[in-house]
Amino acid sequence: MRAQKKIPQTDAIFARLKEINPQADASADTLRLSLDAKAGVQVGAYSRKGKNRVRTKAADHDFRAEEVLTPYGLLLPRDSDLWLYFTTSRVTSDFIVDILDRWWVQHQPRFPRVRTLVINQDNGPENKGRRTQFLKRMVALARQRRRLVRLAYYPPYHSKYNPIEHCWGVLENHWGGDLLDTREAVLGFARSMTWGGKHPTVEVLTDAYPKGVRLTKKGNGAGRRRGSSATGSQRLVRGHPWPRTASVGIVIFCRVPKTHVVRGHCCPAPRVR
C-alpha cells in the first residue's frame, strides 16, 4: 500500500484543529461550518459501478455528457445539517464566498448570538490561505456581515478528515447503483439521501463563474497594508493567541508554510439583537 503523503507540520496542524473545532462547537457565539466540493457528476446513462436490485443497462464508457453538475457541500458538524449546492459552472473563489454569504443571509436569524464563524476547509487551489481573490472576498464578507471568520485548514493530503468529505461517501453509495441520466435524477437522489437522520437541503445554481480571477499586484498590496502579520511556521501551526481586539475580519489558522495572518480591521463588537 502506498504511503500517505505527509508534511512536517501535519501533526501540529491536527493538534491545533483538535483545539479549535471542539472550542467552536462548545461556544454559543461561534458556529463551525465544513465546506468542500465533490467531483463533477456527468449527467447521462453512465455506469457508476454501484449495485442495484433491479437490472439496469448503462454505458460502459463515457460519451459526451449532456450536462456536468458539481456538488458543493456546506455542513454544520454540531447539528448534522447539510446543504448541497449543485452548480453548472466552475467552483471558483467567488463561487465559494457567494455560497457562504448566500447561506448566512438566509439562515442568520437562526443564529442570533453567533459572532464568529469557524470554517473547515482543505487547501484547494481556489480557497487556500494565499489565494488573493478568495481572501479579498472573505474580508469583504466579514466586514459586510460584521462577523469574525476563522479559516481552519486541514493539512495537505488529508482533506478526507474534513467532515463534509464523509457526506460524499454516503451520497455516492446512495446513488451509485442508479442512472443519473437527467438533472432531476441527480437532484432527486441528493434530496433523498440522509445524513445524521436528516435529508439535506438541495439547490441548483446556474450562474457562470470565470476561472482565474485574481488581484493585481497593486490591489494585493493595498489589501495587505490593512492587516498585520506574524511570520514563522511554528507560530502558525501551534496557533497564535486569539486577537481579542478583533471583532470583524478573518483569521487564518493551520496554513502552511509561511504566515499566520489577521486580515481586516478591528472595530467594536456588534450588538446582539
Image: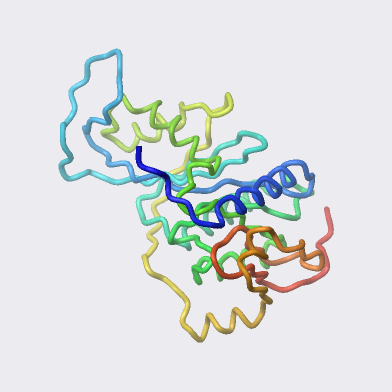
**What is the x, y in percent for residue 8?**
53, 57
| Left or right: 196 in relation to 239 | left
Above or below 176: residue 111: below
Q: How many marks?
A: 0
| Left or right: 146 in relation to 156 | right
Question: In which quadrant of the rendered view does residue 55 lie?
Answer: top left
Nearest to the observer: residue 127 or residue 10: 10
**What is the x, y in percent for residue 173?**
39, 27
Question: In which quadrant of the rendered view does residue 28 lie?
Answer: top right
* Colour scheme: rainbow
| Residue at 66% in and 52% down | 16
Question: In which quadrant of the rendered view does residue 187 lie?
Answer: top left
| Residue at 57% in and 54% down | 153
Nearest to the observer: residue 28 or residue 255: 255
**What is the x, y in percent for residue 96?**
50, 56
Can residue 142 be seen here? no
| Residue at 77% in and 48% down | 112
Above or below 270: residue 184: above
Can residue 249 be seen here? yes
Nearest to the observer: residue 176 or residue 232: 232
Nearest to the observer: residue 258 or residue 116: 258
Quadrant of the frame with the N terminus? top left
> Looking at the image, which residue sits at the far top?
53
**What is the x, y in percent for residue 72?**
46, 46
| Left or right: 206 in relation to 20 | left
Above or below 118: residue 168: above
